[in-house]
Amino acid sequence: MKRINMLIFIIIFLLSAPASGQFYKYVDEKGNIRFTDDINQVPEQQRATAKSYEEAVSATDAEEETSESEAAPDAQQETAAAEVKFDLDLEDLEAARKQLEAFREEIDKEYNELVAEKDALAKEKAEAKTREQILQYNAKVEKLNERVRAYQEKGNLYETQVQAYNDKVAEQNAEQKKSETE
């Protein structure tokens, strides 16, 4: 549960970053027209008159600009979504316990991968300067957010399965205690 809360925090942190979709046009001291996405780079006397532009990027445009190296997270996401259909056989409790342990290890591994990817994206955000780099960064953040949602689904499923397992163990213990007292 602690990890899920941490992951939710990470998602909120990533989503709170500015999208850098706004840029400004101004004239520098030599009369050249300049464009920037940072209002602080516009001279103070021109800030009030600097023309502001909003950039609209469709989801398909952002996806088209992603590189082939990002195909692996898609495959991992599809795998994660497919694995969410985890069914636990509660007739054999020892086998069910082993299934739960294996599923937990898988979830932990995925969590570590997501944290590493988030850290890598934080570094990449600092290096993204051009429009193209920013679009690629934003697309990567979207893919990470999708993987985080899939991770959360897996975590919720795990918690449900653990509760079912615990209920079955408690039921068997109650039956055993009842048979011992009779």
Image: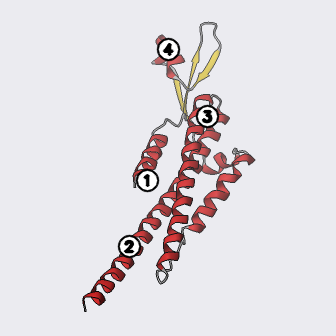
- Between residue 163 and residue 124, name the one nearer to us: 163
Disc 3 on helix, strand or loop? helix
State which quadrant residue 29 falls in.
Answer: top right
Residue at the image point whose x is 61% and y is 50% from the top: 59
Residue position for label 1: 4
Q: How far apart are the alpha carbons under marks 3 and 4?
A: 31 Å
Q: In screen coordinates, is 24 left or right of 93?
A: right
Whether tag 3 and tag 2 are in contact, CB under 8 A, the answer is: no
SS under mark 4: helix
Local SS, label 2 = helix
Residue 57 visible in this rendered orientation of the protein: no
Residue 124: give its label: 3
Q: Earlier in the sequence, mark 3 or mark 1?
A: 1
Pointer 3 and pointer 1: residues touching (CB < 8 Å)? no
Q: Residue 62: image x %, image y %? A: 64, 46
User: Label 1 is placed on what type of residue?
Assistant: Ile
How far apart are the alpha carbons under marks 1 and 2? 20 Å
Q: Viewer-proximal residue, 110 or 69? A: 110
Q: Do labels 3 and 4 touch, CB within 8 Å?
A: no
Q: CA distance from mark 3 to mark 1?
A: 24 Å
- Number of callouts: 4
Question: Which labelled disc corresponds to residue 46?
Answer: 4
Q: Is residue 141 visible?
A: yes
Residue on which disc 2 sits: 166
Circles 1 and 2: CB atoms closer than 8 Å: no
Mark 2 is surrounded, within 10 Å at the Cα level, by few (under 14), some (14 to 19) or many (20 or more) other residues, namely some
Give the number of the mark in front: 4 or 1. Answer: 1
Alpha carbons under labels 4 and 1: distance apart: 47 Å
